[in-house]
Amino acid sequence: MVTEAELAKQTHDLIGKKKYKEAEQLVVPFLINYPDAVWALVGLGISYRAQKKYDAAEACYRRALLIAPDNAEIHSNLSNLMKDADRMDESLKHGEKAVEIEPDHYTFINNLAVNYREAMESEKSLQMYKECEKHRPDDPVTKSDIGFVSMYLNDLDTAWDYFEWRLKTDQVPFPDTMPIPKWEGETDTQDKKLLIISEQGFGDSILMSRFLPLMAEKFKDVYVSCKPPLAPLFEHLPVKLVNHEKISLRGYDYYTPMMSIPRHVEKDWHKWPAMPKLSVTAQSQQKYAFLDNYFIPKKVGIVWSGSVTFKNNEKRSASLEYFMALAAKHPNIQFFSFQKGEREEDLKTFGAGTVLPLGHSFQTFSDTAAALQHMDMIIMTDSALAHLAGAFDVPVLNLLNYRPYWLYTPKSHTTPLYNTMRFIHQPAPNDWDAVFGMADEVLTAYAQSSDADILGLIDDILKKQKL
């Protein structure tokens, strides 16, 4: 006969191993006879939340609070659940209650810091992260988070200094030790060799390529670790490319992570250098020449999801259904899917309709860029393709979630980073309806217009709206 204490321990252990279904199966029979067992309700709530069964998790937490209204753990867990469900007012209410009950509990303080950040209450978030820092002064995740929040607050010196701590977290795969010194802004480098190491996604590499010509002026030779799909874009830049997958860390005088360059060159992204001219191979150009031959002349590319491995991808991505509704409403526009990777399968799930898939044919970003240049514009949720379109001066309507990348703040419809990029912001967490309503207005005007100035058309519409 298993005791309640043993059952509670087994449940705790299963949750610790992320075996949430097994934990659920263990706890549910117990609750039939003991529906007021707080530990079981909490464990079941954690398991349901991890499986994105949000309504079921909420029921468990609210029953637990009915029994134990001053339990800080339950309040904090419910706060996290409400954040996942984009109910930020309730999230903050319960997160604040947890910290009020146990003001020195690190986990509850950290949870509230995260949830303030998601609610775009950056000053309050920073205050909580500073409390976390007092508890764990050498924790790289806390310090990295302070850097991110400071970006939103435009405290650039703090932001870029703390941002360096990302390299010591498991969120950015980076060597623990390096056989060469890190470049810290030294200027006497005309006879030195620099290795720039890519560290994050494709989009960030495209974004930061704007610094490569400048770095080439500072050093005798600049080597860039480059993932193979990006290599054709950069082949004519004044740097030498090395395969990121086979990189050697010896033979250089300095190294720098790619995203660390602005800390020593220009911290304000509104003043960053313009994009250099990136390359498209003749083979890629020939491959997509057929895109000029469609009988419907108006062509729009779409993307509804970034990489599924990106931590915040679920928040920044929208359902393909939104785009399919646009395609159904605008039969006089030919839509092309530029989606690549796992989420291409959505076209099978929902049906492609008149949307023509291209993503499966892209072997490198040179292919993608060649196809992009045949589009009148791209309408998409934020991902690497937005940077690629901006780099090639293709009009891109970037549909942003409520807390977008810090690069897109302060809130505006334009950015000096890319002349042809325009933004539509969510007015509230997960409010894609409002965003796609505005995108529909853009497409309606575009479908009815013979004016080639698409950006001017978009600007006229965005000036009238408050998103």
Image: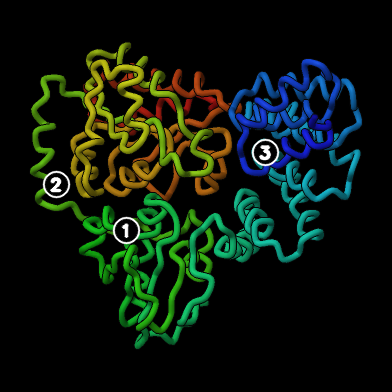
Q: Element under label 1?
A: loop
Which x, y percent locates residue 224?
33, 68
Could you tell me which residue is drawn at 83 percent across and 32 percent down? 3
Please determine whether, in this image, residue 298 is positioned above or below residue 406. Answer: above
Which x, y percent locates residue 330?
29, 14
**Image-based side of 110 in relation to 431, left or right:** right
Q: Are marks 3 and 2 in contact (CB under 8 Å)?
A: no
Q: Which residue is mark 2?
A: 284
Between the C-alphas of marks 1 and 3, the distance is: 36 Å
Looking at the rendered image, the disc whose residue lies closer to the viewer, 1 or 3, is 3
Q: Earlier in the sequence, mark 3 or mark 2?
A: 3
Between the C-alphas of marks 3 and 2, the distance is: 49 Å
Q: Earlier in the sequence, mark 1 or mark 2?
A: 1
Q: Earlier in the sequence, mark 1 or mark 3?
A: 3
Could you tell me which residue is drawn at 41 percent across and 39 percent down? 306
Q: Are marks 1 and 3 in contact (CB under 8 Å)?
A: no
Quarter of the figure that contains the N terminus: top right
Q: Which residue is mark 1?
A: 227
Q: Which residue is mark 3?
A: 15
Looking at the rendered image, the disc whose residue lies closer to the viewer, 3 or 2, is 3
Q: Nearer the viewer, residue 97 or 66?
A: 66
Could you tell me which residue is drawn at 42 percent across and 33 percent down? 381
* Type of amino acid under label 3: Ile
